[in-house]
Image: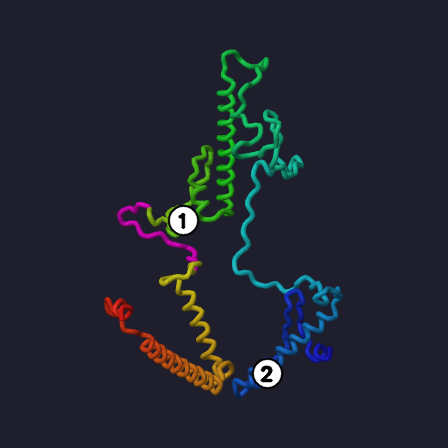
Amino acid sequence: MEIENQHPFQIDLGHLMAFNPHHQFPSIPPSREELISECLQKGTELVQSIANDLFNLPSTEDRDGPLVRLPPPTTRLPREKPLPKPKPPTKWELFAQKKGIKKRKKDKRVYDEQTHTWKRRHGYDRANDEDNIPIIEAKMTDESGEDPFAARRADKKKRVEKQEKNRLQNLKQAAKVGALPSHIQLAATALPITGTQAAPKKITKDELGNVAGMAATSTASGGKFDKKFAGEKPAKHQGKYRKFLPVVEGTGIGSREREQTEKVLSRLISKNSHEILNVNKAVNMYNVKKEKKQRNQQGKSSSSSSKLKANKKLQKKPLKKGSSKQGKAK
């Protein structure tokens, strides 16, 4: 706490930051070493002041030690990019807000009245699917001679078209505000919606290039096997390609992992060779291995020569035909 009284620091525990606005060098240090030592001394004082304030905060005990909850930060840090503009609310969101309708999460499984089983709400083999109903009960309001299945299909088609029109209208409204990315905004300004009196926005060359590049690289092969027009330039790739080494080691690309590890080890050993490598010990180990190798070679040569001599003694001349019969006769 003595340091805080001597140097009134500005401390922001929310960012773990301290700053001394009144510090000034009385004179420029003559050498770089003195400048570095003085900066380290002032930095140590700032860190000590942050530590003192941290230990003054109320803490709770944990198995890893005391835990402290930091206060909210007071220093406003600069932002690299502007805040994104919020999307304008859709007609349904405005209507729900006016009526007080709250969005609730629906279950994924629904009871199917036809099969008396639980099925998924949407997707393939969903519950209460209109296309899988074999019989439709007739109503008093139905007209004679009308196909109920065709009427259901027509109603569904109308609902889908209305929903798509509302979606495009919402995109059109969001494009006016400028809350959409460039490629979606380009598509939204050219939507075939009647009744709009807004003037079309002029698209820049960069936006057109970005959209064309995204469209060209949207295939599974990244546009590698697509047909090219005459004079068409290769599409720009916005991001970076991530390169991974193969899992199985081989003779070609698979040996790069070993080369990388060998390079890292060689750099470490070359930088810290005075700390890692003991020259006397390495020379002794080399001499010992060399002596062992010579002994093994001498032992192998002696054993091979003894084997050759034993083979000479054991070899016997083959007997001629009829020699055994002549010996028995004598």
40, 317: nearer the viewer:
317
Q: Position of residue 166 (x, y in %)?
A: 51, 35
Residue 239 among those drawn in magenta: yes
Q: Looking at the image, which residue is at 35% across and 52% down?
A: 235
Q: Looking at the image, which residue is at 73% across and 77% down?
A: 1
Q: Position of residue 218 (x, y in %)?
A: 40, 47
Residue 160 among those drawn in magenta: no
Q: Which residue is mark 1?
A: 214
Mark closer to the chain start, 2 or 1: 2
Q: Residues within 10 Å of mark 1 (few under 14, many from 20)?
A: some
Q: Position of residue 304 (x, y in %)?
A: 36, 78
Q: Which mark is residue 4?
A: none
Q: Which residue is mark 2?
A: 38
Vertical side of 152 occupied by 275: above or below:
below
Closer mark to the observer between disc 2 and disc 1: 1
Q: Secondary structure at mark 2?
A: helix
Task: Give the CA separation, mark 2 to mark 1.
Answer: 53 Å
One can see residue 243 in this view: no
18, 260: nearer the viewer:
260
Segment colored magenta: 226-244
At label 2, the amino acid type is Glu
Residue that lies at the very extreme toward the front in this rendered image: 330
307, 165: nearer the viewer:
307
One can see residue 37 in this view: yes
Q: Position of residue 284 (x, y in %)?
A: 46, 86
Q: Secondary structure at mark 1?
A: helix
